[in-house]
Image (tube, rainbow, N blue to C red):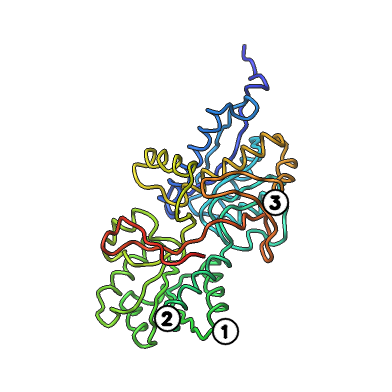
Amino acid sequence: MTTQARPATRPVRIGALVPLTRPGWVEAGRHLLAGLELSVGDVNDAGGIGGRPLELLVRDTAADPQRAAAAVDELARLGVAAVAGEYHSVVARAAAAKADTLRLPFLCSSAVLDTLTEQPTEWVARLPPPQSHGWQVYAGFLLGAGHRRIAVAGEPSVYWAAGTRILRDHLAPRGGTVIELDARALTPEDVCHRLVDRRATALLLLVGFPEPAVSIVGSVRRDRRLAECMIGAPAGQPEFAEWASLLGGDGAGIPFLRYLPEHLGPLGTRVETALRERLGAAPSFVAFEGYDTIAVLADVLRSHGTDRADIAAAWPRVAVEGTRGPIRFSRVPGVSVWQWDRAPVRIVDRDPSEPGRFRIRHVG
């Protein structure tokens, strides 16, 4: 004879979308999951949700939009109160569209594409700043550093195309030029020749990692004609340890967007220590995003219950102290989901004299 769990002890389930296998960015997925799991543990240590434990149902998206949409479908049938996570923007967009259709709350942890849904929705909220904000900050940094002829080595992607458009729209009225290079059609050596021919002073990597990003960086670093050419990676590839291990000193001095404050407060410092122990390495900003995701959802579940409609209705009333500052959601022009519009934005790089240390180059 079996007995059902009493309502008071039945877990509150949250679905988690995470890239854990290739072609997904596995290291980013590992950091995101570490933050999600640590936060769930902290919630349960503090009594859970009204005495009920919080349970994470993890699904690997492998950077596949169709797989992510199918996972949201499955998680909805399993009765999760909400879905959280995802790192890749095109995958998060598919998950958000499916969640909106199913009327299932989705809190996006780490994807920045402005148009996560085609139409405004009440069901989706997001922690990282929209791409239009972060990449405009990056464009301003380029201009401030004296760069006017900026090449982008790109691959086909809604995310990369959106980034290129944001850069061009910000740079062109201010005297900047964006030179597009097709990373599919050009070898890394061809990219170097084009940079010289077009007199570019900066090259931005809007390509996959590890390849072709690693090969392009290596070729540019070896080309003496490009000794003064800055390499940039606005999407954040140099944040992770794999970048440093594959490129060594060549991977230093490459500015990228990072969503961490200059100094963490008491909560952030405690979480950083716990994440470092869990990961065996310095946690990336993505791990903090994972932790904050569950902190927000736990607060909403405690104050508004587990009904999906009530959770979605609570987005504009969120007021949570996150690891990186107070989190509140609002409507941001041009963004279709509820948005934390105060996420910290920094441009940093790895210090060439000490590649394990990050330098702040610009504050957004």
User: Which residue is rendered at x = 64% and y = 56% of the image?
Assistant: 339
Distance from Cα at disc 2 to Cα at disc 1:
15 Å
**Along the viewing direction, whichever of 201 and 336 lies nearer the viewer:** 201
- Disc 3, disc 1: CB below 8 Å? no
Looking at the image, which is closer to me, 326 or 156? 326
In the image, what residue occupies the spot 52% across and 33% down? 42
How far apart marks 3 and 1 lie (CA) works out to 37 Å
Q: Is residue 112 above or below residue 69?
A: below
Residue 266 screen position, x and y as percent: 48, 42
**Label 3: few (<14), some (14–19) or many (≥20) C-alpha neighbours in 10 Å:** some
Against 236, is 200 above or below?
A: below
Disc 2 vs disc 1: which is toward the camera?
Answer: 2
Q: State which mark lies toward you, 3 or 1.
A: 1
Badge 3 or badge 1: first in the primary sequence? 3
Amino acid at dot 3: Asp
* Amino acid type assigned to the residue bearing label 1 in the image: Pro
Q: Which residue in the structure is indicated by mark 1?
A: 173
Q: In which quarter of the image is the N terminus?
A: top right
Q: Determine whether, in the image, residue 108 is placed left or right of residue 188.
A: right
Q: Is mark 2 on a helix, strand or loop?
A: loop
Hey, which quadrant is residue 295 in on the image? top right
Coordinates of residue 119 in the picture (x, y in percent):
72, 61
Q: Looking at the image, which residue is at 52% across and 28% down?
A: 45
Describe residue 157's horizontal placement relative to residue 202 as left or right: right
Camera-side mark, 3 or 2: 2
Indicate the amino acid at tag 2.
Gly
Q: Tell me which corner region of the image, top left, top right, bottom left or bottom right, holds residue 198.
A: bottom left
Circle 1 sits in a helix, a strand or a loop, which is it? helix
Q: How far apart are marks 3 and 2 (CA)?
A: 43 Å
